[in-house]
Amino acid sequence: MTARSSLVWLTLALSLFDPTCNAGPVRQREAVPDGFYAAPYYPTPYGGWEDSWKESYAKAQALVDKMNLAEKTNITGGSGYLMGRLPSPIYEWQTEHELTGTQGNSGSAYRVGFPQLCLQDGALGVGNTDHNTAFPAGITTGATFDKDLIYARAVAMGKEFRGKGAHVLLGPAVGPMGRKPLGGRNWESFGADPILQGIAGALTIKGVQEQGVIATIKHLIGNEQEMYRMYNPLQPGYSSNIDDRTLHELYLWPFADGVHAGVGSAMTSYNAVNGSAASQNAYLINNLLKDELGFQGFVMSDWLSHLSGVASALAGLDMSMPGDTQIPLLGDSPWKFHLAEAVLNGSVPVDRLNDMATRIVAAWYQFGQDKDFPAVNFHSYISSEKGLLYPGAVPVSPIGKVNWFVDVQADHGLVARQVAQDAITLLKNDGDFLPLSTKPPLRVFGSDARVDPAGANACGSRACNKGTLGMGWGSGVTNYPYFDNPITAIKKRVEDVKLYDSDNFPLILTPAPTDDDVAIVFINSDAGENSFTVEGNHGDRDNDKLSAWHNGDKLVQKAAEKYKNVVVVVHTVGPLIVEPWIDLPSVKAVLFAHLPGQEAGESLANVLFGDVSPSGHLPYSITKKEDDLPGSVTKLVKELIGQPQDTYSEGLYIDYRWLNKQKIKPRYAFGHGLSYTTFNYTNAHIKIVNPLSSALPPARQPKPSVPVLSTEIPPASEAYEPAGFTKVWRYIYSWLSKSDADKAYAVGTSSTKSGSKTYPYPEGYSTVQKPGVPAGGGQGGNPALFDTILELVVTVQNTGTQHKGKASVQAYVQFPSDSGYDTPIIQLRDFAKTKELGAGESETVTLRLRRKDLSVWDTQKQNWVAPGAEGDNGKSKRYVVWVGEGSDKLFTRCFSDTLVCEREVEPPV
């Protein structure tokens, strides 16, 4: 048998230890800087009041009412690390497919017809399987600035997850935001801006869930660094200390858009937020996510980040993944049988458990998984047809069929290639050097030009940097079904090609360079999850920083000394410092191809040789030096004693927002991208769709009533272990022995000893449902926040004569100068991309700004305030909406008060 890569989880697990009693209170919080506080917020709001979920909740409540205690607690947790799926001990109607094992497997309630759910990575394709598509990464997708392509990628991914029988896709990632350029997992999400993240995340959720697969928005929240993110017995994970306004306007923003899109699940992050671990942070889960944003789905922990039993349940966590304690050795769990015990002894209210179970089942119904959903047909940890049914139970695990090798690729490679191609970002093109002719000799340098000779999947979890970089490393990866590498695609087009397959420039060049030769230099920069260290980089780029790996800068410099025509191709997880070579006269052109996935070759060749014009735009800024950004984002926290404190002292000012405020000119700005042709933006018009008649949005409607969930402690017999059942070693069950169940029930029903009276509940704990916060009222917040206020139309014309091309249209808002709030000079608020326009051809593009786009979060009012709304005098203040093709190329401005648009004016930055 062959084992798939599981080292990402094994190395993660071995770095941890759970020193706390599972059902006990959380450990004492570490001190955080003044002004940062995770306030208590209890109880967890019930789900089911939002109109689009009511039918699913009604079905779910009816099914949950039929479950006994052990079944309810069973579906709220995983079966254990490396443990796979287990058929019911009583009901034998399951198929052999039920014995497969995926990244995460929930418990089941087969007696009433609820199956185990398969929760599967990753953010760019079905992870740890076969016959799947390796799509371009999130950061590549964001670089397209193309809503249609973002959606098409999501649809294809959703179809593949469904085809493999995976109920839950563990993506999209909209956190990290990319606050820290060195951050290890920035490449999994879409770019360093909340609007780009929010739109891309929402479209991904829409495309995936339309296929009947539950999407998971993650990581909630503040996981902007990999190192020191996790709790261990010697040190807590770092605390992301984020002020209220910054949290709302930057980091929570894309989560609100995702919830507005109806996302079915959410995943908490490993780190703490304002001192409280995210997986048990009541302010974060109960208040912000479930109350203010009106989230109707279920909240899961990230793998092995579940720290407590009762405390996390009270804080709003609904599902423990993969079910184990932090060191998954003996089949112990913070929940499952411990949760059954905590309900029986009165520590966890029965209605909290009922809400947890109902949220999970409601998501299953919401996306039609109760009807004709395919059986799971693969095993995440075994790649052969037969293998260990429960790899974590070796040597006692039985062996059986675990893989059916179902091909789900269809024509999705075409979608992947289109995304990879349209993300390629042309940063420099002196003298219109590109596109290349196929006639001159080409000399290609750098190992990044070809696939790893050992195979594209040779390194487990892609935890190496050998060959063309198609994705980062860690849990967010997938297997390549094949790898279309650049050198092969180039050789298909050009006869005279020579590859110098080394990252060291050769001492002797044969043949000697001529004036007509073109050198293409491939360089890269990798990053990933902290579970692995690659070439001294601990997930984050802490070793190589923002320099190209493998002495890539030197390779470019050497090539530029010998050749008069150099093209640099960069595959990277994020920004690089290109100053060592960018201004060298021989460096004629630079292409950032980001992380293209399996379609790295033809997508690049199509751009290099002019089959298409490049149309990608940077989803981050490239600075001239690392310290052009503030130290709070350029430095990685590294405290060795106590809880590391990652304080967001820069507030709203990350990436281009900071650079604009400080008047620092980047080498290439956020949104920058060149084409082989030119575009003109004309005939801009702006209109008011809905007037801003008040600064505050209309008051939310009262939260509709939902059925009151039972609070009565069930009989102890509902948790009894079935007689004569043989357990699988390390498999996590929800049953209790009769004696333990009876003992817990006696405590829970005691008038003096019940856990409801004796458990040390946290400050502010309450069991009384709250009416809802003012900023809430719908999925994503107050529904009025998503009303369109301003609509702009602009005509884009291809003014070139030789090349077709797609144009990016980006809209940035400038708040009223007398708003009374400190706001960034400009902020992205919408974007669109034209179809491919021929010479002289034009297209009219529409951009929309919502009430929220024109609002700031007021920390006193605890609500969104539009500072340009009509005042008592009936007049509104002026917003300026800037339109262009990048944050540094804004050609047109439109005024919200006069509805006048002007061209060829001095840009704001």
Image (cartoon, rainbow, N blue to C red):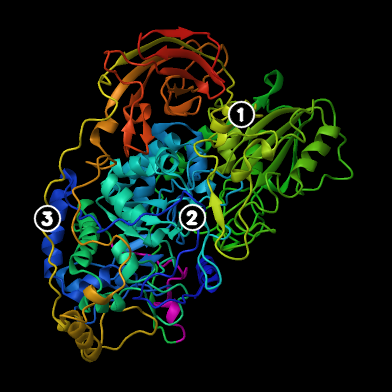
Disc marking residue 476: 2
State the image coordinates of residue 752 (x, y, percent, origin top left): 19, 81
Task: Report which residue position mark 3 lands on.
Answer: 58
**Which structural element holds mark 3?**
helix
Look at 34% across and 42% down and name the residue there. 256
Q: Earlier in the sequence, mark 3 or mark 2?
A: 3
Q: Main secondary structure of the magenta part?
A: loop
Q: Amino acid at mark 1?
A: Gln
Q: Quadrant of residue 848?
A: top left
- Looking at the picture, tell me which residue is in the foreground, 409 or 812: 812
Position above or below: 679 against 744: above
Q: Residue 181: which quarter of the image? A: top right
Identify residue for label 1: 662
The vertical placement of 34 against 26, above or below, is above
Tag nearer the camera, 1 or 2: 1
Q: Which residues are magenta?
A: 375-395
Of the image marks 1 and 3, the number of the one nearer the N terminus: 3
From mark 1 to mark 3, how far is it between C-alphas?
A: 54 Å
In the image, is 657 to the left or to the right of 297? right
Let me know if residue 391 is in the magenta part.
yes
